[in-house]
Amino acid sequence: MSSSSDPSLPSTVQTLDTEVIVIGAGPAGISSALAAHAAGAAVLILDEAPEAGGHLVWEVPDIDEAPIAPVPLWRSSLAEAAAGELDGTGIDYRPETAVWGIFPEGANRFTVGAYDTATDCGLAISARAVIVATGTRDRAWPVRGWELPGFVTERQLLKRLHREVPPIGTRYALIGDGTVTEQVKAAIAVTGGRIDFHSVDINHLRIEGDGRVERIADRAGAVEVDAVVMAFGQRIDPALAVQAGAAHTLHVGEAVPTPFITADGATTIPGLFVVGEAAGVQGARWAYQHGERVGAAAARGVPAHEPPTGIWIDPDKPRRPFFPPPRDREIIVDREEGVTLGAIQDAIEAGAYDINDVRRVTRVGMGESQGAESLPVVATMLLWRDSAIADERLLARVRPPVRPIPFHAFLPQAATSVIAVE
Amino acid sequence: MTDARSSSRILIVGGGVIGTSIAWHLARRGADVTLLEQRGIASAASGASAGGVRQQGRDLRELPLAIASIARWQDLEAELDADIHYRRDGHIQVTEREDDLPRMREAIARQRAVGLDIALVEGNDLRALVPGITPNALAGTYTANDGHANPILTTHAFATAAVRHGARIILDTRVTGFARSGEQVTGVETTNGPFACDWLVLAAGAWSTGLARALDVELPIAPMALQMMATTAMPPALAQVVGALNRHLSLKQIPSGNYVIGGGWPGNTPDLARNLATPRMASILGSMDHSSAIFPALRGARLERVWVGIEGETVDQVPVLGPVPGIANLSLATGFTGHGFALSPIVGQVLSELILDGTPSIPLDALGFGRFAAGSAPDLPQARIHAG
C-alpha cells in the first residue's frame, strides 16, 4: 500500500495504491478480503457502514437474548465474529467510506472513487483487482402513500432501531412477509412497539396522513398507525459492477441489470469481480464461502471471458418479474422525483423506445439513488406490456456517482489558479 | 443535381435532433419521408447533449446558420406544439486573464461584422449580470439572445411533429448496406428489410463514417466521447449559460434546478457497436474544479450524474452539410462535433430546401463535402468551444 499525490488530481483528494479493493464489509466482503490477503495480495476494504459485518450488524440474534432498552439494543455475535477476523491481519479496512464509482483504466487496472463520510474527504484509489461485495438492498414496491415519512423498508427499520434513534412510534403496519420479517417483528417487540396491521397483499392498500404516516387502509377499512414497514425481502445489488461497464443482462425476477459472472465471480472486465449476495448467492454463510473462492481468484488473476449469448431467454416462456406493475395511475413510482405511474404509462404509450428513454422523458430514476427503487418498476411495466421485448431495452444505464458526492471534497484547496487546457 | 419532387421517397438515416428536424421540415411541406433509426429517438449524441442554444464562439463558417437558427428557436415551441424547456437568457464567455481582453475584442468585432449581437461586459456590469460569477472573472463576451433547451424533449418533439405531418419513423432498424444504380442510391438494406428511396439523407453522427464508407465515400469524421455531468437540484441562481476562456466549461441551470456541466471533457474511447462510452474520473474531477472556480456556489453542490455522449467529430470541427460528388441523390447532415443542437432547426430547414427546391436559402458551400477535396486544406477554426 502506498499513498502518493498524483499531480493530475486535485490536492484534497487522497490517492492510494493497493492490489485488491473489496467494496463492502459484509460476510462475502470479509471472507474475500481474507482470502486475497492469504494469497499474498495487499487488500483494502471500503465499507460505507461504521462497523463491519454488513447487514448482520443489525440482526436481532434471538428475541429472548436481546436486552431491553437502553439502546444500542443488541450486538450481533455473528457480525462481531466476522469483523473480528480482520483484526491484526494487516488488511486496510476503512469504515464510513462510500464508493461512488469504479473506473477501469485498461486490463487489470482500476481507479475507484470513494468518499470518506467521517472526514469529508475524497479518495481516488488504484488497484489491479476490484471485488464488488455490495450485497442486497430491500425490495420496495410502490404503494399509494409510500412517499410519506414513516414508511420504511424492513432493513431500514432494523438499522434504525439498532442505532440510537428513537423508534418511529409504537403502532406499526407490516406489509409483506420477507426473509427477515421475523427479525422485524422481534425488533418492534423489543423496542416496545406492536403490529396493528399486517397484509401480504399490496393491492388496494393506501397509506394516508397529513405530512406523515397516520393510517393504512385496505378494503376492510383503515387502521391508525405510526409507521408502515415493507417486508418484501431483498434483491441483489451489483450496480457498481454494471456501472463499471461489465457486460450484463436483465435479472427478470427482480427486473434489474445483473452482470454475467463465472463461478469465480469474474465479470467480463479482467480484474473486476462480484461476490456473495450481490452475485445472487443467498445467505450469509454461503456468501462467506463464495468470498473464499472469489478472493483467491482476484489475488491470482483469472483470464477474461466473453459474455454468454442467448442462454437466458426461453422464447416460449413469458418473462415475468416477481412483482406485477402497480395499476393505480396516481401512485408515485419515483419518491425522489415525484413521478407518477400515470406519467410513465403515458410515456410508454407515446412510444418511448427503452427504459432510458422513459427515464429521460419523465425524469423517473433521475434522482439521487439513480432509480434503484423506481427503475425496476419501469422495467416491469415494459415487460408486462411486451414480454418479448429485447433485454437491451430494459437495462437502465448505471452511471457514476452511484450516490451523490459533494464537490468540495474533490476540489483543490485554492480554486483561484487558472489552468490552461489547450 | 437532380431535384426531389414532393412525391419522391426520401429516406433519412439517424433519429437524432438533426435527422428528426430534417424529417419534420420535409414532412410539413408534404414530402414522403421515412426515417430509420438503429435504436431509439435521441439514443446517442442528442440524448447526451448539453442543450446549449448559442451563436457566439462559433466558427465563422457556421455562424450565419447559427444566427438564422436562433431566429427559428424563438417560435419553435409554438411550431412544434411542445414544451421543450427553451430559455433565452443569454450566454456569457468569461475570462480571468487581463491578456485575453484584446483577443476578446477582436472576436467581438469579427462576429459583429457577420451580424451577431455580441458585446463585452466588464467588472461590475458582469457581476450585476451574473451575480454568482467568480470575482476573478474580469469580463465576458455576452450574447443576450443565446440560451438553452432540453435536447431530449426537443428531439422527441421534432419526431412527434414529423409523424403528425405523415413521416414514418422506424426504430430499431440498422442500415446494413445500400443499393446503387449508377450515380443514384436506390435503396438501403436494413436489419428490418430493404427500403427503396429516391433521396437519401445521412444524419447518423459518429455512425455516418461507416455508412458513408459503404457508399465509397470517405468522411473525415471520427467518433468522440464527450463527458457531461449534473448536480443535484439547487435553488435557482443562474439564468445564463456560462463558459470560460482557458477552461473546459459550459454551465447552465436547468428548470428542475440541476446544474448541467460540460465543456468538452473527454470520456473513454467509445464502443460504437454497443453505443457505449464510459466516463473518466479525471474528467469528473477536472470538471468539478473548473466549474466551481468560475461559479463558486458549486463548491456547495453535490454531483448527481455523469454521462458520455458519442458524437462525430470532423477534422476541422464544423459539420458536413449538403451533396457529395458522384452520388446525385445523397445529402449529408453530420459531423456536428458537439455543437449541432442549436443548429438543428435551421439545418432541418436548409436541408429540406436543398432537397425539395434544389437551393438552400443559406449557402452551405463553406460547410460542404468539397472542402475536404485533395489540395483544398480546410481553414482551422479560430476558437474551439464545446458547449453543445
Image (cartoon, coloured by chain):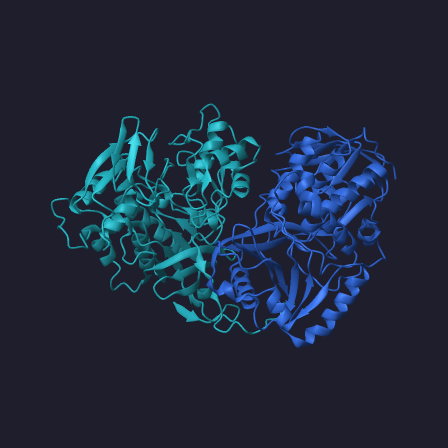
Query: Picture coordinates of residue B164 (x, y %)?
Result: 68, 31
Residue A132 visible in the snapshot: yes
**Residue B90 appears left or right of B351:** left
Identify by letter the chain in cyan.
A
Which quadrant holds residue B244?
A: bottom right
Closer to us: B216 or B233: B233
Quarter of the image with the N terminus of chain A in it: bottom left
- Considering every residue shown, the one lying at the far bottom of the view is B98
Residue A256 visible in the snapshot: no
Closer to us: A417 or A244: A417
- Considering every residue shown, the one lying at the far right of the view is B1
Which quadrant holds residue B204?
A: top right
In the figure, A337 relative to B267: above or below?
above
**Residue A74 appears left or right of B281:** left
In the figure, A112 relative to A332: above or below?
below
The residue depicted at 67 percent of the width and 28 percent of the height is B193
- Considering every residue shown, the one lying at the far top of the view is A316
The residue depicted at 72 percent of the width and 35 percent of the height is B177
The residue depicted at 38 percent of the width and 32 percent of the height is A323
Identify by letter the chain in blue.
B
Query: Picture coordinates of residue A417 (x, y %)?
Result: 56, 74
